[in-house]
Amino acid sequence: MTKTAAIIGGGVIGGGWAARFLLNGWNVRVFDPDPEAQRKIGEVLDNARAAMPGLYDMALPGEGELSFHESMTEAVQGADWIQESVPERLDLKREVYRQLQSACSEDAVIGSSTSGFKPSELQGGATRAGHIIVCHPFNPVYLLPLIEVVGTEANTPGFLDHAEGLLREVGLHPLRVRKEIDAHIADRFLEAVWREALWLVRDGIATTEEIDDAIRMGFGLRWAQMGLFETYRIAGGEAGMRHFIAQFGPCLEWPWTKLMDVPDLTDELVETIAGQSDAQSGQHSIRELERIRDANLVGMMRSLKARDWGAGALMNAHDKLLNATRRVPETLDDIADLARPVLTLDRAVPLDWTDYNGHMNEARYLQAFGDASDRLMMIVGCTTDYIASGGSYFTAETHIRHLDEVRAGARIRVETQVLLGAGKKLHLFHRMYEGDRELATGEHLLIHVSLETRRASDPAPQVAEPLARLAAAHATLERPKGAGAAVGPR
Ligand SMILES: NC(=O)C1=CN([C@@H]2O[C@H](COP(=O)(O)OP(=O)(O)OC[C@H]3O[C@@H](n4cnc5c(N)ncnc54)[C@H](O)[C@@H]3O)[C@@H](O)[C@H]2O)C=CC1
Ligand SMILES: C[N+](C)(C)CC(=O)CC(=O)[O-]
């Protein structure tokens, strides 16, 4: 049966919770006295619909039903989960629990999004204290999986397990906080970093942008994939965590931070930290951890690169710089000898193009050959301006032969021979190499189209003429081995 979530308070965080439940197939019932709440939640949902499905390889379930209610008591009717996300005021939150517990089902979970209140504070005065727990999310709730789950002795272990099971069903990662504490775990870090940043700004040491760069160009990237302890284990070199503490422990007493209340690094504390670090990560050698870290970082940075944002924008600027030294032509005039296959791609194989077999994944051959076709189109005049004017090529047929494997970091190039370039047809034969080693061939038939009618059409003279020149020069070349081959044993 479809589960139901009641969202009490539909602001920044409540809207994110609504999206998380709804896009995972739950029905969602919202109560928020703000007359703008429906519009705001609608806008959050639009963003979530655009972003969340892209996280997964499997399709999400169909969306549940979304409804808005005039009263809290109506909204919580039949709800399996009630998520309170009203402003961070203890009196308000307690009043909300008092009202909703008079109307909700007796076994409904009541999760609070509170950033800092302890569950015992929230439970004080409640009718059924054992049904209220902290479920602290991170913005945006529909993308970030962490939920800090905090209970008290009033909550039975079975109740916390049940709540965590429901959170997992909607793709969240519940982290059970062992003992209640103000601001749970993550917000204590955020507050410490935030306070230190405010000091740096106040003292004129750094601007907000410089502080943000100090995070996003450096340790922020590391934290996103390995956290603090695993990162520092590696930073200790082969001797790991113990060496890291021996080297950097004393710095904690130096004025490296405004927050100077430092715990004594007793042997017992060092043993506890090092022992827990062994239990957490000791199954991997430092070198293995380095490789895992690097693969994670590459994956993250490549996605930032695709978004041209932060460290990714930096990499794109560097790419442009590198491109200046590349040999790939942009126009026919850049080619010294037309009667040779044209260099259409010259690049490295990034780590995230490789797969479980430790070599470039088959899908990336098509990507590389697709990029090579794009470059050949550009060379003969089918440029972005030409495409904007309404003409382009669509690929109608593709045949890739995998001849040899290639690994991450290799420099690959594609040389392209035009087998036919006349009328609507553009028949290309790409050969991919690493050095002298032939890795693959790609044979592609492209058809010129009108982007207005979406039908085949003859190319305009600014494409037809250069293409005819290149095709005539390539007609003098030997027909490549494998051209026109069907799938089967070689
Ligand atoms: N904004 C953030 O980054 C995060 C906030 N939180 C926590 O989430 C909770 C909500 O914070 P935000 O969403 O940021 O605040 P917000 O101000 O964006 O939203 C609060 C919503 O509650 C509504 N509201 C006020 N009184 C209400 C009532 N009696 N019944 C129902 N709705 C009521 C308001 O109209 C508003 O739409 C807080 O406890 C906060 O600490 C948790 C994680 C991150
Ligand atoms: C600033 N904050 C304390 C409200 C932050 C959070 O609670 C979590 C987050 O999303 O950063």
Image (spheres, rainbow, N blue to C red):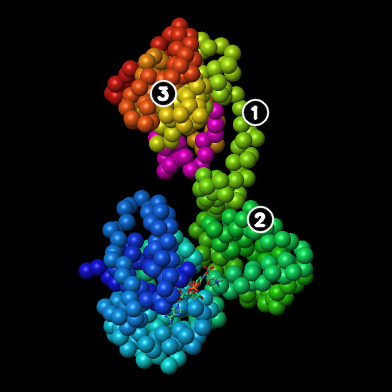
Q: Earlier in the sequence, mark 3 or mark 1?
A: 1
Q: Secondary structure at mark 1?
A: loop
Between the C-alphas of marks 3 and 1, the distance is: 26 Å
Residue corresponding to mark 1: 325
Residue range in magenta is: 346-362
- Residue 381, position in %: x, y? 50, 22
Mark 2: give few (<14), some (14-19) or many (20+) Cα within 10 Å. Answer: some
Name the residue nearer the viewer: 214 or 160: 214
Instruction: Report x, y in % for residue 460.
Output: 43, 19
Q: Is residue 258 magenta?
A: no
Which of the 4 image quarters holds residue 411?
Answer: top right
Give the percent coordinates (x, y) of residue 429: 41, 20
Residue occupying the point 63% across, 39% down: 318
Looking at the image, the residue that sits furthest to the top is: 476
For mark 3, what is the residue?
Answer: 441
Looking at numbered disc 3 in the image, what kind of residue is underneath it?
Thr
Specify few, some or many for label 1: CA neighbours under 10 Å numbering under 14, 14-19, or 20 or more. Answer: few
Q: Where residue 213 is drawn, which disc sits there? A: 2
> Percent x, y for residue 137?
46, 70
Q: Quick check: can you spot residue 237?
A: no
Residue 263 visible in the displayed image:
yes
Contact, mark 3 vs mark 1 (Cβ under 8 Å)? no
